[in-house]
Every structure is written in structure tokens, then in C-alpha cells.
Image (cartoon, rainbow, N blue to C red):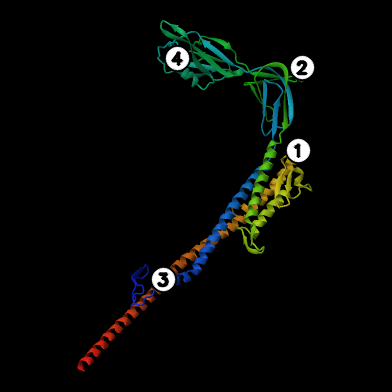
Amino acid sequence: MATAALSTTSTTGLGLSGLSSGLDTSGIITKLMSVEAAPQTALKTQLSTTTTYRTALQSLNSSVAAIAASAKSATAAGALSSFTATSDAAGVTATASSSASAGSVSFTVDRLAQAQVSVTGTIAAWPAPADGSAKPSITLQVGGGTAKTVTAASTNLDDVVAAINGSGTGVTATKVAVGSSNGATQYRLQLRGATGDGNGFAVYQGDSTASPALATTQTQTAQSAQITLYKGVAGAEQQVLSSSNTFDDLLTGVDVTVSAASTATATVSVAADSTAATTSAQALTSSLITLFSGISAASAVTTTTSSSGSTSATSGSIFTGDSIVRAVNDSLLSAATDPVGGRSPSSIGINLTKDGTISFDKAKFSAAMAADPAGTTSMFQTIAGRVSAAASGASDSYTGTLTQKITSQQSTESSLTKQISDWDTRLAAIQAQYTSQFNALETALNSLSSQASYLTSQIGGLTTNYQGAN
């Protein structure tokens, strides 16, 4: 009689794998469980498909949200208003901010700003305080401001320099080595203030301006930079001062910096610069083109043709037939290409193509900006506003159509995951039942086999006795 090895299972402990029947009961149970698990397998396949779809939607949603933000930024007041300032003089430079506007101004540069520079006589250390203190007090007076007194750690010039430089008055000190005397290095202390007429300074050897003034020689006086507007025009000539060599907002939003005095007239001109608008338009259309291309590829239907020329198979992509994704695509396409006040966006280089996407003609947009900067900017900002609204309608964190679809898919995934888990419990019980039934079968067959062996031995004994009696 055939026998098989003992086997164990996780549900019933010891199992009899065909010990009496000769059947591969473990293999039979495995095949039965494969049939029983078919619904769970289908659920797992559905979960995988749902997860893949949800992941694709999230990627699309991120791209649409980025377009919404980019388009919205382009609609901000002044976002595309860019101006460039230029100068026709080598000693004059100008920079324009976003608040600038077109215009020009002419002037002469009369003088540059400079700081007061004063130097002490030759010294090896700071003069010792009259009161015998080891830590000298130094008072600095800048212009008509409040005097500031600082205390040096010692009469060592390095300590004095540190005290002055840390005073916060705008006066700085530098130790300049000028030779030696009796083996000791000699220095002159150079003091420099800030530029501008009101930044002249005085230094006192004590804790007030009543203290003795530090003996210095002034090598340069403090003065402000000066330019003259409308020079030579009676009733219009105007001097303008600046404590530095930069004249802030000489024209609204335009800073002018001078680096050389000259009697020649310098002219600063400010003109509109289309770079910001062109860059913004190119970036937005490029993002849309990439999005449309991605949706098209993810919605394509692939057809396989056999060698005989007949269609053998047709398969869709992740977004094939997806009405929500198609609606997002169409709303963005319409936002970018629908007329603005009866004027086609193609007039500024934003074109609808025959394959259902858009293209951007940079040269045409730049030409439109040159011909009508205000009108072109307004038209593009209107388009950007429509794109922003359409993209936000799809990607809004709460009400977006894509966002809501993603939330729905996540709920489906949670439900499928629970169903799969429930099937794990159900299948474990079914497997335990099959194992128990087959174990009972093996036990019954084993009992019958034992009875058959007993009867066979008894019949054999009777036969032997009968033959012996004869």
C-alpha cells in the first residue's frame, strides 16, 4: 500500500498527507485554495490598478497646481512691468526697479562725495590720561549729533583702534606704521568718517567735548556729491546733493551712481524692457505644452497589427477615456487659446496647433511687446488669469476636480485593502476546514486498512487450521 510523509500546517498542527489514501492531500488543498482565493486575487489586481491610477492623478495634479501658481504670479500688478535704465556717460551708471517708468533726465556731475580723513602726529601709544587712568576715554563728535564716549582697554594703539571702530559713530581708525625711534615702532593714527557734508567729526582726549581735542591734521574734508540738473537753463537749474555717490530715486524707481566729476552733460534714459513679459509667457506656455503632451501620451490607445494586416490587439493607457482628465485638458487649452476681447492669442504668439496643443512664437511676442507693450502685457495677463483659474479649479486642495478624484481613489484603496484583509481571515478558515476534512478522511481510511489487515490475518489462520485437520 502506498504511503506518504507526515506534513504540518499552520492551522491544524499535525496533518496526514496521504498516509493511508496515497493521495497528495497537501497539493489538493493548495489547488482548492487557489480556487477559493480567486475573489481575493481579483481584489488585489483591482487595488494595484487603483493605486497606479491614483499615483498618476497625483502627478498630474502636482503639475496643474504648479501651472496655477505660475500663472497667478504673472497676473500680479507690476509683475511684467520691467524697465531698463542706461547712461551715455562713462562716469554715470543707473539701475531701474519695478516701480520705474519711462523717462530721461540730464545733468552734470559737479563733485563726488568724500569722507573727512584726519591723521595724528607720530606716536607710539595713545597719550596717557591726565587723571592717571590706565584706560583712556575717547569722545567722538560727528556733525551736529550727540557726542559718543568710548573707553579703550589701554593706551596701546591696537586697543584704541578697537574702541573707536566699535563706537558705532561711523568713524574708523587705522594704525599706520611710519618708522621707528629708539627701537620702538612709530605710528600715525588715521581716522576716517562717513561721506557727506554732515559727517565731519572731531576727537577729544577725555570723556566730553570739553576735553582737549586730539591733535590731528585734516587731509580730506567731508562733502556730499553734487549734480546740477538743467544746467544753464534760467529758472530751472537745480543742484541736488547726496551724502553718497548714489542718488536714490533721482527718477522714480531709478538710482543713479556717479564715479567721476565732469562738466559734460550726462543723460540717463529709462525705457520699457520686454524681457520679463517674454520670459513669463515662454515659461507658462512651455509648462502647458509639457502638460498637454503628457496627458496625450497617457490617454493614447495602442493597436497591434498582425502580419496579415488585421488588428490583433488594442490597449489603452492610464487616462484613456478618462472624462475628468479630458475636462482638465480642455479647460486649460481653452483658457490659453480663446480670444481676448475678440482678439486671438495667436496675435501675440500663443498659437493653437492642429494636434490639440499650443505653441509659442517668441519673436512674435517680442514684436508685439515692442509695438504695444501695455496692450500686449494686458492681453497676456488676461490669458494667465484664465489659465490660473482653470488650473486652480482642477488642483485646489479642497474643491479641485482632480483632488476630489484622488480622494475618491484613496477611499477605494482603503476599502479594497480591508476586503483583502477580510479574505485573509476567511481563507485561513477555509484552509483549516479542508485540512480537517482530509485528515478525517485519512484517519477513516487508516482505520479501515487496519480492519482489513485483521480480517485477512483471521481468514489466513482459519485456512491453516482447516488444512491441518485434513
Q: Is residue 316 left or right of residue 360?
A: left
Identify the residue under disc 1: 367
Is there CB contact under 8 Å for labels 2 and 3? no
Q: Which mark is residue 27?
A: 3
**Closer to the eye: label 4 or 1:** 1
Residue 78: image x %, image y %? 68, 38
Name the residue at the top extreme: 182
Of 130 and 268, nearer the camera is 268
Q: Which mark is residue 157?
A: 4
Q: Residue at x 45, y 71 (%)?
A: 31
Amino acid found under the numbered disc labelled 4: Leu
Q: CA distance from mark 3 to mark 4?
A: 98 Å
Instruction: Identify the element where label 4 is drawn.
Output: helix
Q: Which mark is residue 232?
A: 2
| Rendered-image quadrant of the C terminus | bottom left
How crowded pointer 3 is (Cα within 10 Å; few <14, some 14-19, many 20+) is rated as: few
Q: Which mark is residue 445?
A: none
Instruction: Specify which label sits upstream in the sequence, 2 or 1.
Output: 2
**Closer to the eye: label 2 or 1:** 1
- Placement of 51 over or under 209, stated as above or below: below
Q: CA distance from mark 4 to mark 1?
A: 66 Å
Instruction: Identify the element where label 3 is drawn.
Output: helix
Instruction: Specify which label sits upstream in the sequence, 3 or 4.
Output: 3
- Name the quadrant containing residue 192: top right
- Name the quadrant containing residue 186: top left
Amino acid found under the numbered disc labelled 2: Gly
Could you tell me if residue 391 is visible in this image?
no
Residue 77: image x %, image y %? 68, 40
Amino acid found under the numbered disc labelled 1: Ala
Of 280 and 214, nearer the camera is 280
Q: CA distance from mark 2 to mark 1?
A: 40 Å
